Image (cartoon, coloured by chain):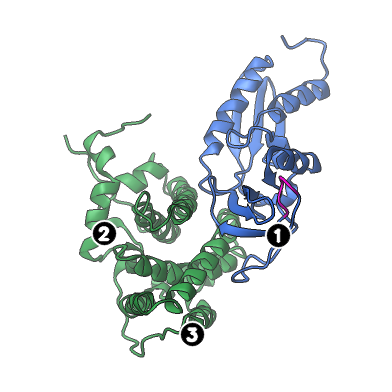
Chain colours: A blue, B green
Amino acid sequence: MVAVASSDAELRQRAWDAAAAVTDPEIPVLTIADLGVLRAVELIGDRVEVAITPTYSGCPAMSMIALEIELALARAGFGETKVRTVLSPAWTTDWMSEEGRRKLKAYGIAPPLASTSRRALFGVQQVQCPQCGSEDTELLSEFGSTSCKALWRCKACREPFDYFKCH
Amino acid sequence: MATPSIIVSEIPLVLYTLRRADDALILGHRLSEWCGHAPALEEDMALSNIALDLIGQARELYAYAAEIEGNDLTEDSLAYLRDVRQYRNLLLVERPNGDFAHTMVRQLFYSAFADRYWRAMMGSTDATLAAIAAKSEKESAYHLRHSSEWIIRLGDGTAESHARAQAAVTDLWSFTGEMFTADASERGLIEAAIAVDPAMLLPEWLATVSQVVRQATLALPENDWMQQGGRDGRHSEHLGHLLSELQYMQRSYPGASW
């Protein structure tokens, strides 16, 4: 499938595009590129090396994502793929793309706010309801259905919603 | 047929990394025991989330210890095939969950320490340890906030929750001193700026814990006699029971995977 005439740059771009289209198994509207989890794609001979960074240390989605990347590259016609995990620099929600934030909100998850103090007790964050846009919301639980989310409730439309935690 | 246990060498960097990994794994396992039993669904999810963070931190540290030690060790063999005396975690983290107040006080004492510890370790001259610390620090900040808020709610709550929270603070106090000790093996790494000197963190830790406890209308005990032994592999009877559950599958079905 890989055209012989393709230049290295084109091949690399094709490998990047294939890996970048892999979605997060827990939040399927986001690709790993939107999340900032995909760090690098390199071609070494006919091998592809992909570097990803975990969101949270124990995030169980990481092994699923690594498997999906191998499959995506195989489907795009690449040979052996090696996925490696890089820890430094540590992932931050600042790496989430604008497009990713927009998609999250449309999906019903409030996108992460710009850095707030993670150490202030009974914090005074103002999270906007992704359903009705009201800012009259309250925190139900600091820890939600996945490592990266907290559970909130909107006092205006009464809907509970997930908030993608600032990290 | 029984699986032979592994014994790791006393290379200072391996020992140092294992101590941090064991703290995270054992506390993570303790918190996972709450899964399905917490007082409310939100809290069940919170404790499981924190357990997951801790087990994730342990995996990164074990993987690094295995890499330095060599001998075909893996993160799994370090977790599943060491006997109790080979575990080097703090006595604090192996304490049984007790009631919710006990679990939360243990979490406050450890998180207030870990939060500072990881922040200091971000400056380690060992690039892998610094990278693991930078990830863990973000997580421990949430853990500290979560347990601090609970201690304040419980202490400054009903007469019953106040009494239970105070009993937990009193019971667990003597297990806090061990966090700030370092032996000769660790001292060398501290001098090389690879390891963090835990004694340096005591004033800040005490300030954080005292402030939360005061706001919770609770009091820290006056006694300063402290338990020790975990860092050298001398544990309470509770760790063996914990490991028998944690290691059951690999001990009974060696090499099982899915």
Q: What's the mark number on residue B239?
A: 2
- Whether label 2 touches label 3, CB < 8 Å: no
Amino acid at the residue labelled 3: Arg
Amino acid at the residue labelled 2: Leu
Residue at the image point whose x is 58% and y is 36% from the top:
A26
* CA–CA distance in space, label 2 to label 1: 47 Å
The verdict on a common chain for dots 2 and 1 is no
- Whether label 1 touches label 3, CB < 8 Å: no
Residue A111 at x, y = what percent? Answer: 71, 48
| Mark 1 residue crowding within 10 angstroms, few (<14) / some (14–19) / many (20+) | some
- Subunit under mark 1: A
Residue B80 at x, y = what percent? Answer: 31, 45
Q: Which residue is mark 1?
A: A136
The part of the chain drawn in magenta is A128-132
Amino acid at the residue labelled 1: Asp
Q: Quadrant of residue B43?
A: bottom left
